[in-house]
């Protein structure tokens, strides 16, 4: 072989080696961006927490059942509520914080969030009074954040669910695991292995995805029961409601999961038979809800997201302009070049937008389908409410257009509009998730963690008052309104420095 031929052969071999590595590194970089990992970390400097005991006085305190307020004093010692008593009974010498007649409620829990690699979201939650979250597709990174928060980092307490389980084979499975951060379980033996690993790694629960096989779903129920490890999440497409009740998860991750299971039972609806489908949902949802209540299975709401589907399709620009996009991670909102849509929110990449090439007839048909989708989910929700099923307020934060922290207040308004009384709405984000997780949060009573929110108005009179926050207390550390505004400003500034696409005006 001549020198030139050897050079060409060497160059070709090098190209064969370099091209796959370069492609991998490029895709990995884009994935990190898509999950928010390239956004600058917010810079924040706040005074150190005071260690001395203190008491809130001249304040209206939400009762443990979340039904009414009482004029009480709340004593905080070492990050916990040590006493709730009449102001006249306060011990001498304790520092007092004048609540000026405001309303003190437990810190809120968003029971369905995705932090991905977007760590500035931790500040957004606290700034919005969200002192606990359930991370629904966790990672080693979110476990690390959980430990850091427990040791004093500013952020919500985290209940971390392991990367959701899905059944795929071969290369497809590897690709899904890489790009969608799922745990691939081709067999029942894999289910047994990974659940044990998750428990050992410190995850709090395991989640079924829509793409888990029926056999693996049933195996998950058996393994989780044997290990006393909570299982929750989606009802897989391959399973039905009877399978779900056999697995008996502790919680269903969205109200719409029940609606989709009824859709499969119905045989699949479309625009032509939508009214027939809605009648079917009305006829079946009461029985399903009654059984959920009897089995003690909770359901997370995510109704604001469902309600947004038709609106995002009909007038995305209006929806985006109404959302506090300046606080959403720009990597997540801008999407990625590796797919046409990625996880994006903005007009050219939004995962829920209608394709521009669709004609008007197709657009009307799609909108009618999604309006029926939202209506059917609403019917199921009504049945859950009527039958006393435990409902956990959750938002699917970081899915378009659920901005972390802000989205929970939107969910509160949506739940109220859907028929929940303000007291029920508050309970769904305080008492109910506290009991579900077994954590001593969600109530203002002795021995509970001092995660608190002081509001300017009475949320039992108007649920929108949850957004008028004067102070947040996280494990006893007080954050004033100025502190909370500093958190928001730091996140916005970091986002602005990281942004590559102009936001809609």
Image (cartoon, rainbow, N blue to C red):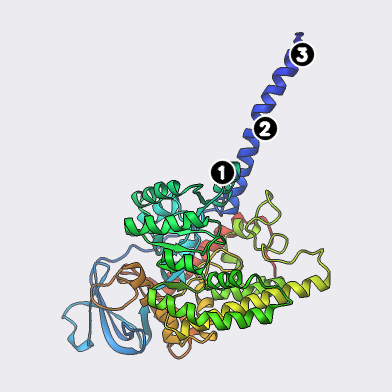
User: Which residue reaches farthest top?
Assistant: 2
Local crowd at mark 3 within 10 Å, few (<14), some, or many (≥20)?
A: few
| Residue 268 figure quarter | bottom right
The count of marks equals 3
Question: Nearest the camera: 412 or 227?
Answer: 227
State the residue at coordinates (56%, 65%). 327
| Residue 246 figure quarter | bottom left
Q: Position of residue 239 (x, y in %)?
A: 53, 62
Q: Position of residue 462 (x, y in %)?
A: 48, 88
Q: Are marks 3 and 1 in contact (CB under 8 Å)?
A: no
Residue at mark 3 = 5
State the residue at coordinates (33%, 62%). 48
Q: Are marks 1 and 2 in contact (CB under 8 Å)?
A: no
Residue at mark 2 = 19
Residue at mark 1 = 174
Circle 1 SS class: helix
State the residue at coordinates (55%, 75%). 303
């Amino acid at each position: 072989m001549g020198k030139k031929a050897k050079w060409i052969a060497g160059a070709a071999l090098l190209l064969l080696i370099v091209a796959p590595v370069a492609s991998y590194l490029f895709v990995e970089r884009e994935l990190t961006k898509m999950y928010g990992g390239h956004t600058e970390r917010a810079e924040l400097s706040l005074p150190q927490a005071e260690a001395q005991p203190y008491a809130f006085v001249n304040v209206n305190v939400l009762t443990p059942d979340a039904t009414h307020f009482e004029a009480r004093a709340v004593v905080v010692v070492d990050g916990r509520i040590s006493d709730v008593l009449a102001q006249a009974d306060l011990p001498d010498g304790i520092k007092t914080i004048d609540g000026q007649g405001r309303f003190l409620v437990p810190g809120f829990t968003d029971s369905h969030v995705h932090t991905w690699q977007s760590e500035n979201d931790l500040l957004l939650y606290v700034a919005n009074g969200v002192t606990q979250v359930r991370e629904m597709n966790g990672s080693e990174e979110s476990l690390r954040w959980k430990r850091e928060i427990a040791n004093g980092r500013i952020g919500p307490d985290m209940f971390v669910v392991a990367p959701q389980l899905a059944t795929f084979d071969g290369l497809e499975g590897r690709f899904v695991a890489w790009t969608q951060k799922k745990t691939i379980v081709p067999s029942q033996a894999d289910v047994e292995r990974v659940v044990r690993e998750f428990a050992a790694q410190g995850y709090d629960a395991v989640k079924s995805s829509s793409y888990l096989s029926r056999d693996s779903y049933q195996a998950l129920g058996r393994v989780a029961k044997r290990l006393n490890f909570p299982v929750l999440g989606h009802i897989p497409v391959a399973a039905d409601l009877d399978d779900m009740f056999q697995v008996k998860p502790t919680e269903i991750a969205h109200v719409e999961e029940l609606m989709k299971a009824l859709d499969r039972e119905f045989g699949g609806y479309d625009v032509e038979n939508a009214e027939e489908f809605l009648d079917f949902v009305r006829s079946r949802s009461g029985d399903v809800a009654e059984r959920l209540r009897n089995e003690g299975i909770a359901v997370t709401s995510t109704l604001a997201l469902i309600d947004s589907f038709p609106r995002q399709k009909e007038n995305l620009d209006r929806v985006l302009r109404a959302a506090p996009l300046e606080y959403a991670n720009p990597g997540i909102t801008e999407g990625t070049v590796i797919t046409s849509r990625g996880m994006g929110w903005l007009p050219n990449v939004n995962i829920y937008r209608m394709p521009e090439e669709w004609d008007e007839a197709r657009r009307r048909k799609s909108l009618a389908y999604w309006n029926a989708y939202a209506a059917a989910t609403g019917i199921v929700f009504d049945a859950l409410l009527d039958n006393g099923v435990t409902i956990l307020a959750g938002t699917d934060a970081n899915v378009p257009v659920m901005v972390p922290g802000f989205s929970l207040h939107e969910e509160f308004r949506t739940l109220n509009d859907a028929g929940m009384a303000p007291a029920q709405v508050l309970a769904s984000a305080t008492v109910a998730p506290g009991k579900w997780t077994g954590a001593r949060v969600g109530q203002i009573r002795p021995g509970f963690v001092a995660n608190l929110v002081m509001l300017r108005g009475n949320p039992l009179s108007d649920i929108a008052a949850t957004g008028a926050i004067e102070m947040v207390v996280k494990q006893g550390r007080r954050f004033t309104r100025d502190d909370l505004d500093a958190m928001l400003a730091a996140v916005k500034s970091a986002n602005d420095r990281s942004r590559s696409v102009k936001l809609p005006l």
